[in-house]
Amino acid sequence: MRTGTTLMELVVCLAVLVAVTALATPRLNELGDRVEVRSVREELVGLMTQARAVGVARGGATLVLESEPPAALLLARDSLVRSVRLGRTALPPELLLPAGRASTAFDFDALGIGRFASATIVVRRGRAEAGIVVSSYGRVRRR
């Protein structure tokens, strides 16, 4: 008597494996999109907080957000403090800025108070979406 598997048993196992993979792939892609979108949102919240702190420390700061490619520049008195490419993957999320602009700037004074209109920034990739609402004084709320 021989031990082992037959060709038919291997084919059936591979067919089951392919079916399970086909069912799991879309869910894993959605999960990856959600994680990436939330990561970029938290990075934006951190940049806003850092911009307020730099504004207090250096007498003013400006955070410039660009939608294509998604990036952020933190400036203090016209000198570059930090430059960040938003998104960690080869397919970065879409950054939707207020009024459909390609870039927008948030200015903070020496007291850390923003001097701009309230804005909503949305980060989107696939069906996943997250955003922040920035008040006219520079406070950030996640949505």
Image: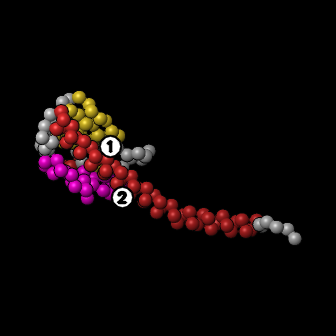
Asked which quadrant contains residue 129, the reply is bottom left
Upstream in the sequence, badge 2 or badge 1?
A: 1
Closer to us: 31 or 110: 110
Q: Would you name the residue on which mark 1 appears?
A: 70
In percent of width and height, residue 20 lies at 57, 66
Q: Is residue 20 magenta?
A: no
Q: Amino acid at mark 1?
A: Pro
The residue stretch that appears in magenta: 118-143
- Would you say 24 lies left or right of 117 here? right
**Quadrant of the rendered image containing residue 15:** bottom right
Residue 112 is situated, as x and y percent measured from the top left of the image, at 15, 42
Quadrant housing the C terminus: bottom left
Residue at 27%, 33% in the rendered image: 81
Q: Residue 130: image x %, image y %? A: 30, 56
Q: Residue furthest top?
A: 79
Query: Which sits in the foreground, 111 or 47?
Result: 111
- Residue designated by label 2: 128
